[in-house]
């Protein structure tokens, strides 16, 4: 009996530690190499998540690049749902690839993950060679609209990227066709526009910001539903003459499927508290991400992703863009 009582006491004393979360470092994965916009957003977020989780939490960023985030998303689906492995994902892996990849992905972007909250949106920007006709954003849009089909080349950072989809959507909305010239990176794309090898392109705003400020390319309009705070002078494409145009990339925090509700809630609370900090909001803005400060529980995050997956399904269907495995 004494042995049984001693065992019971030991288990009781250990129970709070066993229930504590987190009880070891949390891995915050991204599907991209260090230095890109997704990696930067993850590193900005990691320290604040740890602070708001408490319990001596540590959040360590791990880069798992490959196939535009698809490899890391497949990996995340297989991880233990104990809250110690989470991932910052974006539109490429969770909205474009599931709709555009020939044969589809080996994960359902909505059903196969646990939702921890939306991090923010990151608009794209229409940029043009500095000598392209049109003194105002509306005049540039009208020039592109009036161009004969296949008379103007546009540059992108690759086939099947969000900037490719946005450019093809723009062509559809303008009722014309353009010639696609893909490059291997956003930097090469912007250099091509500066040199006149392409007349326009849609770029990730964070990547193009310095070239726009330096006058290497002209910033015309952002592609989201509102002006971006760091470039308030740039109208939306809707304001510039393309009604209803709204296509942006975004970051959302996910976990493996089957995460316990209490752990999911703890991570969500830490994320929401982090995003409420003005200093963190400013750091994300500098990185090209507009922090999400709207209602942001797990259900709101799931609804957000569901809407975006459907939006991109329509875009892929309309444009006919496909990704080869």
Image (tube, rainbow, N blue to C red):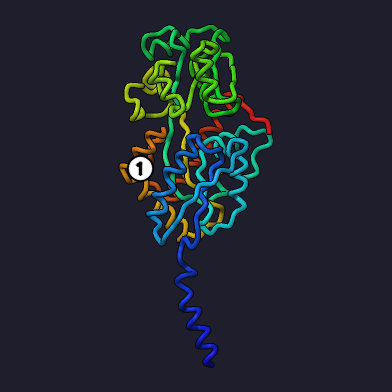
In percent of width and height, residue 251 lies at 47, 40
Report helix, strand or loop for mark 1: helix
Label 1: few (<14), some (14–19) or many (≥20) C-alpha neighbours in 10 Å: some
Badge count: 1
Say whether residue 108 is left or right of residue 170.
right
Residue 2 seen from this side: yes
Mark 1 sits on what residue?
280
Indicate the quadrant containing the N terminus: top left, top right, bottom left or bottom right: bottom right
Q: Would residue 118 be found to the left or right of residue 317 on screen?
A: left
Q: Camera-side residue: 144 or 163?
A: 163
- The residue shown at (52%, 42%) is 89
The quarter of the rendered structure image containing the C terminus is top right
- Residue 140: horizontal and vertical position, in percent? 42, 11
- Nearer to me, 246 or 122: 122
Location of residue 162 with respect to 217 vertically, above or below: below
Which residue appears at 39% of the width and 59% of the height? 54
Spot occupied by residue 167 in the image (x, y as percentages of width and height): 52, 21
Q: Residue furthest left?
A: 278
Q: Depth check: give the residue in front, 53 or 222.
A: 53
Instruction: Report whether residue 108 is seen.
Output: no
Where residue 116 appears, x then y in whole percent? 46, 50
Where 309 falls versus 206 (above or below)? Answer: below
Which of the 4 quarters of the picture holds residue 209?
Answer: top left
Left or right: residue 132 versus residue 76 is left
Residue furthest out toward the bottom: 1
Q: Residue at x 42, y 39 (%)?
A: 120
């Amino acid at each position: 009996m004494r042995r049984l009582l001693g065992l019971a006491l030991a288990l009781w004393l250990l129970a709070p530690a066993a229930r504590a979360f987190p009880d070891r470092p949390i891995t915050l994965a991204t599907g991209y190499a260090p230095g890109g916009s997704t990696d930067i957003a993850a590193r900005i977020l990691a320290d604040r998540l740890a602070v708001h989780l408490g319990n001596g939490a540590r959040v360590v960023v791990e880069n798992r690049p490959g196939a535009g985030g698809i490899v890391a998303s497949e990996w995340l689906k297989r991880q233990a749902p104990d809250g110690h492995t989470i991932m910052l994902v974006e539109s490429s892996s969770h909205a474009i690839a599931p709709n555009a990849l020939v044969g589809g992905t080996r994960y359902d972007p909505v059903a196969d993950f646990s939702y921890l909250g939306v991090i923010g949106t990151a608009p794209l920007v229409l940029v043009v060679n500095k000598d392209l006709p049109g003194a105002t954003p509306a005049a540039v849009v009208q020039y592109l609209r009036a161009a004969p089909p296949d008379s103007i080349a546009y540059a992108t950072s690759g086939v099947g990227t969000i900037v490719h989809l946005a450019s093809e959507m723009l062509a559809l909305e303008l009722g014309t066709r353009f010639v696609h010239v893909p490059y291997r990176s956003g930097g090469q794309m912007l250099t091509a526009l500066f040199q006149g090898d392409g007349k326009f392109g849609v770029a990730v705003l964070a990547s193009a910001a310095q070239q726009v400020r330096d006058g290497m390319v002209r910033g015309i309009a952002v592609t989201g539903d509102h002006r971006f705070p760091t470039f308030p002078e740039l109208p939306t494409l809707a304001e510039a003459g393309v009604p209803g145009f709204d296509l942006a990339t975004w970051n959302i925090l996910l976990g493996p499927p089957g995460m316990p509700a209490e752990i999911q809630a703890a991570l969500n609370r830490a994320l929401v508290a982090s995003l409420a900090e003005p200093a963190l909001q400013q750091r994300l803005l500098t990185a090209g991400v507009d922090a999400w400060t709207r209602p942001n529980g797990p259900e709101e995050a799931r609804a957000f992703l569901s809407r975006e997956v459907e939006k991109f399904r329509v875009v892929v269907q309309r444009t006919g863009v496909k990704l080869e495995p």
